[in-house]
């Protein structure tokens, strides 16, 4: 409807302009060929039509009324001018031109109304008012023929108007559809722009999350690498501790063998002393044998003292090993607590190792006390043997003292035998303890190696994950680029 009104107004303006052009041309023609008086007449008639048409356009009279009145104005003006001049041969040409002006509206109603108006003007002027439009020299028959031709032309213009109007309506409908489609397209592009903006925002957020994930993944990978490195160092420490434990076992085995040798010697000396006690009556005749036995006893006592010194040294080594084991167990417990759930089992083992180390240290202290007593006894035995050796030189006068010394020596060796048995028991317990510790250390070393391998696999997986995340980030960047291009395209549309 609005497009139809715009078309009528546009045709109105064109027809008004055309009327004024005809006014000027006809006035100029009349002035050039017939003088000023006829020019003024022509100008008055045509200018009146132009003024009326201009007023209708300026005041925006109803479109249907204006489309009928505006073409009628020049028709009436031409008719009045023809009547005043006594007729005009060109009047029907003017009517035809004005009919074409009416046909520009592409309105059947306008054309039919204008046709009726033209026919009414011809009939009224020719048959009622008896005013010949083509002049008095032209017969009525010619006027009728011209009228018929005008009507035939109007019929042609009617169908032209009808078909043109159909095409115009179709064009207007298509234009309306195109406008609606364009509006929908603009709406679609607007939504696309909004979606692209939202997509860009989501992509930016996703990129931030991806960068955060990459940083977290790199931190986890770095932590896994550090953990693997720590596990390897712990495994190396455990291996070193296991090696030290084996060395301690070897030394403990050596102490055990030496203790057996001391026991064997002690038993031999005890047997000799007992035999000497039984044969004390005959020792006067066998003084040389006694001297030899005493010297052997002195030598044995000195060796026993040396063995006690060696045992003290071994016990000192065991104490140091126990202290080092305690420190290593403490360090292992600290590292296990840092490892979290993965090092919980190792922390329990480290605590047991620490307890066993404390027990070993306490046992070593007890053995040291026992050995100290044995050493005192051994020193006493040495002194006794020396006195016996001195007494043997004095002869038979010292046999009684020698007998007493031998009895004391037998008692001392009996006590020493008991102490040595206790020492054997403690050494065996320490040996079993060291065996258990070594077994646990080997198990822990194997577990640490498995954990190290697992951590390396985790690190490799994290590296692969980082590579995939970086690849995904590149894809998202390409999507962001395409989204930005789509948003720019939507804004341009």
Image (spheres, rainbow, N blue to C red):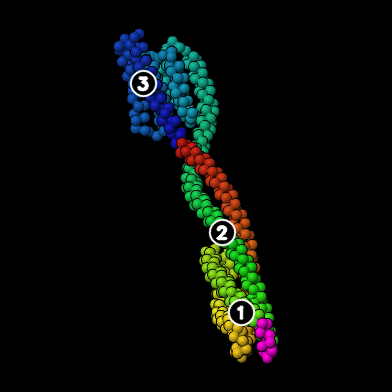
**Earlier residue among tags 2 and 3:** 3
> What distance separates the C-alpha of mark 3 from that of mark 1?
162 Å
Label 3 vs label 1, nearer the camera: 1
261 to 70, vertically: above or below: below
Which residues are drawn in magenta?
276-290
Q: Residues within 10 Å of mark 1 (few under 14, many from 20)?
A: many
| Residue 243 image offset from top left, x and y in percent | 61, 63
**Earlier residue among tags 3 and 1:** 3
| Residue 231 image offset from top left, x and y in percent | 57, 59
Q: Residues within 10 Å of mark 2 (few under 14, many from 20)?
A: few
- Seen from the viewer's position, the closer of residues 351 and 322 is 322
**Secondary element type, mark 1:** helix
User: Magenta stretch: residue 394 in it?
Assistant: no
Instruction: Using the image, tell me which numbered label, if any, was put on residue 233.
Output: 2
Residue found at x 49% / y 20%? 150
Instruction: Using the image, tell me which numbered label, if any, was put on residue 20.
Output: 3
> Could you tell whether 66 is left or right of 411 in the image?
left
| Residue 175 image offset from top left, x and y in percent | 50, 34
393 to 135, vertically: above or below: below
Q: Picture quarter containing residue 367?
A: bottom right
- In the rendered image, which residue does mark 1 sit on? 298
């Amino acid at each position: 409807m609005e497009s139809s009104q715009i078309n009528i107004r546009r045709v109105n303006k064109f027809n008004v302009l055309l009327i004024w052009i005809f006014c000027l041309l006809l006035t100029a023609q009349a002035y050039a060929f017939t003088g000023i008086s006829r020019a003024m007449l022509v100008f008055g008639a045509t200018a009146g039509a132009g003024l009326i048409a201009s007023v209708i356009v300026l005041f925006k009279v109803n479109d249907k009324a204006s489309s009928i009145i505006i073409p009628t104005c020049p028709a009436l003006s031409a008719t009045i001018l023809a009547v005043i001049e006594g007729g005009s041969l060109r009047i029907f040409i003017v009517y035809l031109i004005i009919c074409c002006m009416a046909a520009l509206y592409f309105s059947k109603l306008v054309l039919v109304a204008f046709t009726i108006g033209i026919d009414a003007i011809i009939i009224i002027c020719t048959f009622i008012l008896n005013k010949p439009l083509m002049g008095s020299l032209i017969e009525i028959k010619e006027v009728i023929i011209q009228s018929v031709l005008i009507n035939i032309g109007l019929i042609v213009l009617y169908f032209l108007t009808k078909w043109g109007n159909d095409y115009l309506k179709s064009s207007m409908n298509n234009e309306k559809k195109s406008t609606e489609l364009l509006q929908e397209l603009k709406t679609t592009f607007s939504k696309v722009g909004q979606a692209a903006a939202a997509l860009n925002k989501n992509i930016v957020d996703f990129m931030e999350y991806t960068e955060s994930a990459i940083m977290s993944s790199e931190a986890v990978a770095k932590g896994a690498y550090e953990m693997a490195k720590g596990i390897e160092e712990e495994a190396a420490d455990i291996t070193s501790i296991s090696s030290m434990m084996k060395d301690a076992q070897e030394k403990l085995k050596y102490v055990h063998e030496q203790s057996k040798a001391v026991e064997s010697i002690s038993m031999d000396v005890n047997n000799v002393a007992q035999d000497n006690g039984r044969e004390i009556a005959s020792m006067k005749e066998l003084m040389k044998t006694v001297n030899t036995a005493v010297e052997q006893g002195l030598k044995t006592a000195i060796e026993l003292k040396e063995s006690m010194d060696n045992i003290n040294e071994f016990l000192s080594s065991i104490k140091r090993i126990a202290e080092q084991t305690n420190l290593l167990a403490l360090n292992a417990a600290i590292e296990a607590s840092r490892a979290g759930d993965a090092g919980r089992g190792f922390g329990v083992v480290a605590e047991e190792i620490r307890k066993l180390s404390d027990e070993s240290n306490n046992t070593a202290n007890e053995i040291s006390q026992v050995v100290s007593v044995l050493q005192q006894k051994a020193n006493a035995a040495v002194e006794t043997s020396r006195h016996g050796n001195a007494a043997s030189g004095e002869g038979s006068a010292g046999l009684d003292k020698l007998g007493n010394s031998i009895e004391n020596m037998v008692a001392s060796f009996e006590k020493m035998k008991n102490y040595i048995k206790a020492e054997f028991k403690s050494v065996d317990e320490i040996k079993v303890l060291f065996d258990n510790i070594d077994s646990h250390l080997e198990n822990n070393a194997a577990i640490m190696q498995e954990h190290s391998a697992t951590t390396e696999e985790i690190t490799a997986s994290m590296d692969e994950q980082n590579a995939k995340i970086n690849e995904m980030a590149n894809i998202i960047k390409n999507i962001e680029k395409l989204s930005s291009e789509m948003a720019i395209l939507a804004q341009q549309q």
